[in-house]
Image (cartoon, rainbow, N blue to C red):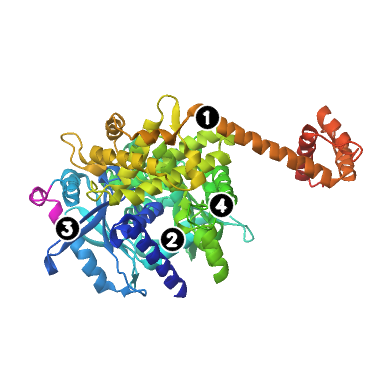
């Protein structure tokens, strides 16, 4: 409970600081921060704030936000309500309290589906936006998901709990309370217990063949899953069954595949021989012995890492081809992966299983070399203190969820204070943040507006391809300029809500559009924004700040004044047409904006000079290393190379010179060749 209390205190302090800095209510800052986590957890693909509250008692209605257009989410409509309490200690609520919080959201849903409710609202209000979306899309809605977000502790149990349906549309609710957020932040664990009980809930245990020996590193099973059983499991848990990295990188939201659908409809008995089946993982399985042999009775935290299209297509057949589904069977390979090995094992299973996506970013997980390199830069590169501050600091890149909070929790109180100075919480950023910074600057605000996961999926493809072509591009200079973009992005997040023209709502869209606009306008007459000044000073200067807020006002106008016939501004911001409108507008920047620019050739020259200095430093370090190891050491390496017959003439000469020290000292080129041979020798266990 002490850990939960510490987590609560930290969250409350962060929310208060963000609200004060941006001049917004704490519940607004709470919504923004917590829904980012929901997107990261795969609960939502995007979260748009849309606060509305009216009525009293049993007539009270309320909504805080929604999860975008259900037509983009496999017919799932997600509605969000917030429960935020600014108390000194952790508060709790029970099932009765839950009902009191969820019922106003249900009443909103019932009323907002009607044209009469919509037409009684101001068209500029967030409630109108949601209601208009519901009226337009209700016939396409297949499931409603109500999400309660709270900074209190829920005393009850349950995850994705079913409620009564509205017509043919089932309704579920999900509670994200303080404990659940704490688990997610610490280790990525988002569920109380997602236990799939085949015997109790899905028609019986599944016959299985154990595919691993008793002393195997991982427990594995081969299983045959009836199609109807798989469809009903997916119907309950939805896309959360799909391993988060697959969902993020491949965007495999179980989209219906026409070929799979055709087989189910016309040749269901041939589905098994035609289909490659599923690859899945679990935290644990419960097995039983039946009259026919071994069977799996339940699976904990079941995740499909390959077979999303198969699963989604089978689920679609529940309505389109229910009778044929009885003849469909799917093979499944299930591997039990302990949580502590998940990051190491699951990406490899996914990479090797997703053969049709080899060229895509299937291997672009947290252990991809790109992320490892950025993480290393973030731990090593120190930035000068801002004006008026005493301490230099670093930016903490969290390539795997929980790295920051876990690294801090292992320290003593004194060490935590030092850690907080070295890595301020405000300088923490994750993979999806990195993608937002880069794609905003690159002129893709419409992609950023589609949500963190969709945006990151596109970013992963682009960086994955670029890394293959030239990994050396992503060096210290690139990292420092990434931090400059982060500073700009965070400046806009803080300053936009303070502006007189800001009417509330669409802050996230305005931020990415404003940043994209400024970077676009800066690239004129062979010039670019001088990012090096920003990371050196660790702040946005006055001239740049004015220019950014001018672009932000123009972004606000472009988003909130869509073309005739377009009424949902959040959905409008996700369209490339919206970016085209803003990109084409001429803005009158102050003359001092020119001081923020640099010739593109100068920027490239700065990059080359930095690389030259770095290479020179490396060369000096290599020479020093060669001299330090001494002639006798290098005589041993030379003998090894001759015996192996693996030395080039240049390497042979370099090593011979190294053996002549101190009579003759190797130059930079000799040292480079010698250290190259040393690396090969060490790979073979020599030296």
Q: In this figure, which residue is indicated by the disc labeled 1?
A: 602
Circle 3 packing at 10 Å, graded few (<14), some (14-19), many (20+), is many
Q: Looking at the picture, tell me which residue is in the foreground, 10 or 303.
A: 10
Compute the Cα span from label 1 to label 2.
44 Å
What's the distance in space between the residues labelled 1 and 3, CA to CA? Answer: 57 Å
* Residue at mark 4: 345
What secondary structure is marked by label 3? Answer: helix
Q: Of the residues under marks 3 and 4, which one precedes in the sequence?
A: 3
Q: Residue at x 83, y 43 (%)?
A: 627
Quadrant in which residue 161 is drawn: bottom left
Name the mark on residue 295: none
Tag 2 secondary structure = helix
Is residue 279 shown to the viewer in this render? yes
Dot 4: few (<14), some (14–19), or many (≥20) neighbours within 10 Å? some
Kindly identify which numbered label has been placed on residue 184: 2
* Residue topped by disc 3: 108
Of residues 665 and 279, the one nearer the viewer is 665
Q: Distance between the residues labelled 4 and 2?
A: 20 Å
The percent coordinates of residue 434 (x first, y second) are: 46, 45
């Amino acid at each position: 409970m002490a850990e939960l209390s510490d987590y609560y205190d930290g969250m409350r302090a962060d929310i208060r600081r963000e609200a004060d800095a941006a001049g917004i209510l704490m519940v607004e800052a709470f919504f923004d921060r917590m829904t980012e986590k929901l997107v990261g957890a795969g609960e939502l693909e995007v979260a748009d704030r849309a606060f509305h509250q009216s009525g009293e008692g049993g007539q009270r209605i309320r909504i805080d936000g929604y999860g975008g257009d259900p037509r983009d989410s496999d017919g799932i409509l997600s509605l969000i309500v917030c429960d935020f309490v600014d108390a000194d200690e952790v508060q709790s609520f029970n099932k009765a309290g839950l009902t009191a919080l969820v019922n106003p959201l249900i009443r909103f849903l019932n009323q907002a589906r009607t044209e009469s409710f919509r037409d009684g609202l101001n068209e500029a209000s967030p409630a109108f936006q949601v209601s208009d979306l519901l009226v337009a899309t209700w016939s396409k809605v297949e499931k409603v998901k109500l999400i309660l977000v709270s900074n209190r502790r829920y005393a009850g149990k349950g995850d994705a709990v079913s409620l009564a349906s509205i017509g043919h549309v089932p309704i579920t609710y999900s509670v994200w309370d303080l404990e659940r957020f704490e688990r997610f932040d610490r280790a990525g664990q988002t569920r109380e217990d997602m236990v799939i009980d085949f015997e109790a809930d899905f028609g019986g245990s599944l016959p299985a063949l154990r595919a691993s020996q008793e002393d195997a590193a991982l427990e594995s099973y081969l299983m045959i899953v009836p199609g109807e059983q798989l469809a009903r499991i997916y119907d309950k848990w939805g896309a959360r069954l799909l391993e988060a990295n697959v969902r993020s990188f491949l965007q495999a939201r179980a989209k219906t595949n026409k070929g799979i659908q055709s087989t189910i409809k016309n040749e269901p008995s041939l589905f098994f021989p035609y289909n490659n089946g599923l690859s899945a993982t679990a935290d644990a399985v419960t097995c039983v012995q039946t009259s026919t042999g071994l069977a799996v009775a339940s699976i904990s935290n079941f995740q499909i890492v390959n077979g999303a299209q198969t699963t989604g297509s089978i689920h679609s057949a529940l309505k389109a081809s229910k009778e044929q589904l009885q003849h469909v069977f799917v093979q499944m390979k299930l591997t039990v992966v302990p949580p502590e090995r998940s990051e190491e094992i699951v990406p490899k299973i996914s990479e090797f299983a997703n053969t049709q996506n080899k060229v895509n970013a299937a291997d672009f997980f947290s252990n991809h070399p790109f992320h490892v390199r950025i993480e290393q830069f973030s731990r090593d590169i120190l930035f000068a203190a801002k004006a008026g501050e005493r301490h230099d600091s670093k930016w903490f890149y969290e390539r795997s969820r929980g790295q920051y909070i876990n690294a801090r929790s292992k320290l003593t109180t004194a060490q935590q204070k030092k850690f907080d100075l070295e890595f301020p919480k405000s300088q923490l950023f994750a993979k999806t943040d990195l993608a937002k910074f880069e794609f905003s600057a690159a002129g893709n605000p419409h992609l950023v507006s589609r949500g963190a996961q969709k945006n990151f999926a596109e970013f992963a493809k682009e960086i994955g391809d670029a890394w293959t072509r030239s990994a050396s591009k992503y060096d210290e200079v690139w990292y420092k300029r990434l931090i400059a973009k982060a500073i700009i992005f965070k400046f806009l997040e803080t300053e936009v809500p303070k502006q007189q023209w800001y009417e509330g709502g669409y802050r996230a869209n305005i931020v990415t559009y404003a940043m994209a606009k400024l970077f676009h306008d800066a690239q004129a007459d062979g010039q670019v924004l001088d990012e090096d000044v920003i990371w050196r000073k660790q702040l946005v200067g006055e001239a740049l700040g004015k220019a950014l807020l001018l672009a932000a006002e123009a972004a606000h106008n472009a988003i909130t004044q869509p073309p005739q016939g377009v009424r949902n501004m959040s959905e409008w911001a996700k369209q490339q047409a919206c970016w085209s409108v803003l990109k084409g507008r001429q803005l009158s920047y102050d003359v001092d904006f020119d001081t923020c620019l640099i010739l593109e050739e100068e920027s490239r020259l700065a990059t080359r000079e930095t690389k030259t200095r770095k290479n020179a430093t490396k060369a000096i370090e290599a020479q020093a290393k060669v001299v330090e190891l001494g002639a006798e050491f290098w005589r041993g390496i030379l003998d090894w190379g001759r015996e192996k017959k693996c030395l080039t003439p240049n390497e042979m000469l370099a090593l011979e010179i190294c053996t002549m020290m101190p009579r003759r000292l190797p130059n930079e080129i000799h040292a480079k060749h010698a250290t190259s041979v040393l690396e090969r020798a060490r790979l073979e266990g020599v030296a």
